[in-house]
Amino acid sequence: MRISVIIGHPDPGSFNHAIAEAAVDALEKNGHLVSYHDLYREEFDPILTGPEIPRGGAVDPAVESHCAEIAGADGIIIVHPNWWGQPPAILKGWVDRVMRPGVAYQFLEGDGGEGVPVGLLKARSALIFNTSNTPKEREMEAFGDPLDGLWKRCVFGLCGVSEVRRRTFSVVVTSTPEERRAWLVEVEDIVGSLYPPETGGEPLRQPAPGRDPPPTGSRGVAGARIGVVLGDITEMEVDAIVNAANPTLLGGGGVDGAIHEAAGPRLLEECRTLGGCPPGEARITKGYRLPAKFVIHTVGPVWHGGGRGEDGLLARAYSSSLSLAAERGAKTIAFPSISTGAYGFPLDRAARVAVGEIKRFLETNDTIEDVTIVCFSEKARGCYREALEKMG
Ligand code: ADP
């Protein structure tokens, strides 16, 4: 695949550059063709001029070549710091000038520009890496993470890119070398999962779902002690909810971000004392502001095509979480669909592994009375219900 990597950070020694380099390494290792643009180094001119605005307007050759590359890219990776909830101006200018009509989007015939345009980019997926010095919980509470909507909806959503993943690393300024090393490993893992080796299977293309209504739906379709619901795991009134965390245990996107946001900052404080968690293992904390008494943080595998022990690691993430819950006397526990978001594990396969492992555990354990799998999309609910019906 042809992948464009765009970085907007003025300091070549920045952690942003380390992220971009790790991403490029992972792409090249997997046999992809990388087109790398360090916007500051190449002194990209971010100023969009009047004559350039209309479709067919006068575009300078440097911008023209950016346009051709981005239009032909199969995937796009953007790396930048969070400045004022926005990308640096140079990157905003790159969006202004390169994501132009006729290249990234177009209006339908007869539309004078007031309608909803159609996306033109060939890329079906994009990945955004951000760095921030604002703790996650303050970012959410005080600012609402404007970059998320900006990249996912305003830019890539409008230009036709259906799968947009985003990971923010924070707080960079106080991070330890070990944390930063772990973050770079995560960058490689996420890039490798979205853009696996050329000869490997297709990456999972699961659009990130929006928030679903509170838990509804049938319970105990098959196994009497296992239920599948559609909903938000942070609202579950159970003894323990499971978090699909990353190895740092210091918060992230997806369900991890939602759990930290709902539990409040003291959850992160306790997580800092745990020293991380390898894939397949689990750690326990209190639930703080959540209805659940405990949060069990487990780390699922990043999907690499299925040949790197992903099934076994995913099964272990479930069994480790259940063992820990039982040890603490939790009787009711809720799981999200581990590894099937940013980590790219195919949903139907993950559902079979999860249901199989939960059933196996419950056969020899009496402490846990009820396990709920909380799905965040109808598609996920369908997969888990099917797995449960088949194995029930
Ligand atoms: P991973 O990194 O393990 O793939 P993600 O958080 O990216 O973890 O995704 C795991 C699953 O959790 C995905 O199916 C995603 O849709 C789902 N999810 C996201 N937010 C919530 C939530 N609030 N409640 C339940 N599930 C959620």
Image (cartoon, grey):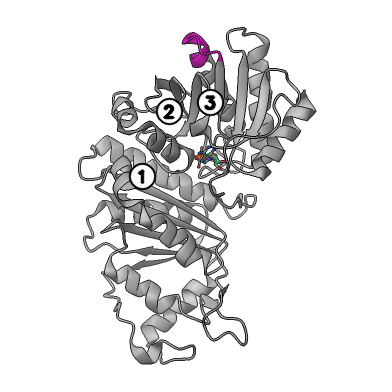
Q: Mark 2 vs ligand 1: CB under 8 Å?
A: no
CA separation in Å, label 2 and label 1? 31 Å
| Nearest the eye: 63 or 168 | 168
Q: Residues within 10 Å of mark 3 (few under 14, many from 20)?
A: many
Q: Which amino acid does label 1 sit on?
A: Leu
Report if the CB atoms under discs 2 and 1 are less than 8 Å apart: no
Which residue is labeled 3 in the image?
Answer: 317
Which residue is label 2 attached to? Answer: 290
Percent from the top left, x then y, of residue 119?
56, 72
Identify the residue at image location x=33%, y=68%.
Answer: 91
**How dense is the environment of label 2, judged by Cα within 10 Å: few (below 14), some, or many (20 and up)?**
many
Q: Which of 272 and 70 is in front in this view?
A: 272
Rendered image quadrant of residue 375? top right
| Nearer to me, 329 or 236 | 236
> Of helix, strand and loop, which one carries label 1?
helix
Neighbor class of circle 1 (other Cα within 10 Å; few <14, some 14-19, many 20+) is many
Counting from the top left corner in percent of width and height, residue 237 is at 52, 24
Q: Do the residues labelled 1 and 3 touch (CB within 8 Å)?
A: no
Q: Choose mark 1 or mark 3, whichever is in front.
A: 3
Q: Distance between the residues labelled 2 and 3?
A: 22 Å
Q: Residue drawn at (28%, 42%), measured in percent from left and top?
A: 135
Q: Which of marks 2 and 1 is nearer the N terminus?
A: 1
Residue that carries the numbered disc 1 in the rendered image: 184
Type of amino acid under label 3: Ala
For marks 2 and 3, the one nearer the N-term is 2
- Indicate whether residue 326 is drawn in magenta: yes
Q: In which quarter of the image is the C terminus?
A: top right
Q: Any magenta on residue 236?
A: no
